[in-house]
Amino acid sequence: MTERLSRLRRMREQALAGGGSARIEQQHAKGKLTARERLAILLDEASFQELGALATHQSTEFGMERHKVPGDGIITGFGKINGRRVAVFAQDFTVLGGSFSEVQSHKISRIQDLALESGIPLIGLNDSGGARVQEGVRSLAAYGEVFLRNVMASGVIPQISLIMGPCAGGAVYSPALTDFTIMVDGTSNMFLTGPEIVRTVTGEDVDAETLGGAAVHNSRSGVAQFSAPSEHAALALAKTLLSYLPQNNNDDPPQVTPHDSPDRMDESLNTIVPADDGEAYDMRDVLDRVFDTESVLEVHPDFAPNAIVAFARLDGHSVGIVANQPMVMAGALDLDGSDKIARFITLCDMFNIPLVTFVDCPGYLPGVEQEHSGVIRHGAKIIYAYCQATVPKISVVTRKAIGGSYVAMSSKQMNNDIAFAWPSAQIAVMGAEGAARLLNRQALKEAEDPAALEAEFIADYREKFFNPYRAADLGQIDEVIEPRETRARLIRSLEVLQTKVQTSLPKKHGLFPV
Ligand code: HXC
């Protein structure tokens, strides 16, 4: 027995040592932690229970029998984050570059299955050179096993991916199928084909950071929702993010003890919208004043900044915020803004997180480039996502809700539950200048002073339509409220909607306008 125990202990030690001290030093020299160090930071102390620590590959090609390390370059198991159960995997770059093997696939799949059956979130720490080249096509099939489970788990348990090193080739698609991707500035990359292949195929000379670093995926491609300045910060962010999410789709998001009065009025909100409606204001200032203090966590903050999506709390309850940002493109909706909003609405709906929408939007962005790039298809995503969402939905029109944006941004007719407007709201079918030209074409042609006639028409149109009262008359707005009372009104409305009956039509699935 003693001999058998010694053997087990030896193997466990080997598993703990990963690729060995020299490789660990190289990892540290790159400013990266090891997989085990990361898990120790992520999980509550002594909560980690490892599975598959002794699994090794069976390959013999390319001298692989000499490269056997218990665990095979990946650590999988269960642990707790702030007392909540989670499933985790962490790729170990010190073992064959964390390359993805059949054994890695079996270990991740096992954890995915257990996470799904137990209804607990899955967090993956990615640091890998992609498919293990020595295993050939076997490592490709292995990816399929993991992708399948990513898709099966989508909408059932939260899935969070952290990119903490390279994530190359097929490895990129597992994070892309999860709910959130967090990248570390400077040390993480995501690309299907690396700089060398890009150079060979297209002749473009590009380095790894420019091709697929955290900055480009957070601001341009939209592949990642968050970036963090360090690995510690990325792991802390994953924990914060989890605090807004439920364990699974049958659970409610966790409630924190409220630290902010539900009746708090903020007088400054009454003057936050500038009198000149061409002047911008920062919608984030509105959100910070309305929601529980310091509870707003922006998702995708650097991508499509004309739209804001964020988690926040109202009286300790998780909510999802969708808002236009008048500081960027006057808050107009474009291709990327539409994608960003639609994805977030769908995500909140699948995890029972009520939606609060703040509207100040002049409409969808006009232009040849937008039309030819499919603003109709992309814009339709917002409408589809709002119409499909059955969670409680409340909207607040702070200023412009003009044309398509009035309808698309959670209008009453699209199953919005409660619609508020501030007195500064302008709810109209189109902008005053456009309406003046459209309705007075002949009169303007014949007028002695067309500019004066146009100005007169614009003033009259604005007087008649640029307010919330017509919409309130028609019941399209439930209540015009003072901005300072927004917080209290939202909290009371959500209290009522807590028990909202949520029904969906029995269908396999619709065709989301992708
Ligand atoms: C096997 C790999 C590997 C891989 C790295 N290693 N990637 N082994 N398969 N995919 C090994 C290296 O040979 C090296 O071993 C060790 O890991 C560390 O790698 P380095 O290159 O020394 O590290 P670094 O300089 O930090 O560069 C990291 C890297 C680079 C940028 C990730 O290794 C790289 O470019 N790897 C290949 C990336 C790639 O093209 N992957 C796509 C695979 S095909 P030694 O013993 O020499 O130190 C694919 C298609 C799947 O994924 C499609 C599915 C849908």
Image (spheres, helix red, strand yellow):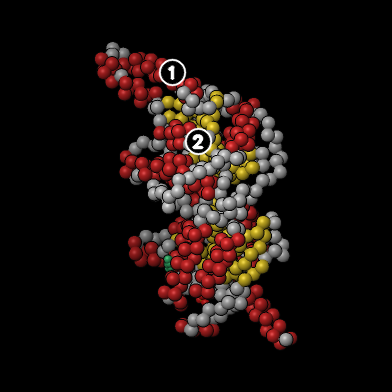
> Which secondary structure, mark 1?
helix
Instruction: Give the amino acid type for the residue marked by disc 1 in the picture.
Output: Lys
Circle 1 residue? 464
Could you say which disc has been placed on residue 416 in the image?
2
Nearest the viewer among 112 and 458 is: 112
Q: CA distance from mark 2 to mark 1?
A: 25 Å
* Residue shown at the point (28%, 16%) measured from the top left: 443
Amino acid type at circle 2 is Asn
Callout 1 crowding tier (Cα within 10 Å): few <14, some 14–19, many ≥20? few
Q: Residue 416: image x %, image y %?
A: 50, 35
Q: What mark, if any, has residue 196 been given in the picture?
A: none
The percent coordinates of residue 167 (x first, y second) are 49, 63
Horizontal relation, residue 442 to residue 59: left or right = left
Identify whether 165 is placed above or below 400. Answer: below
User: In the image, what residue occupies the spot 61% across and 44% down?
Assistant: 318
Residue 87's x, y, as percent? 61, 62
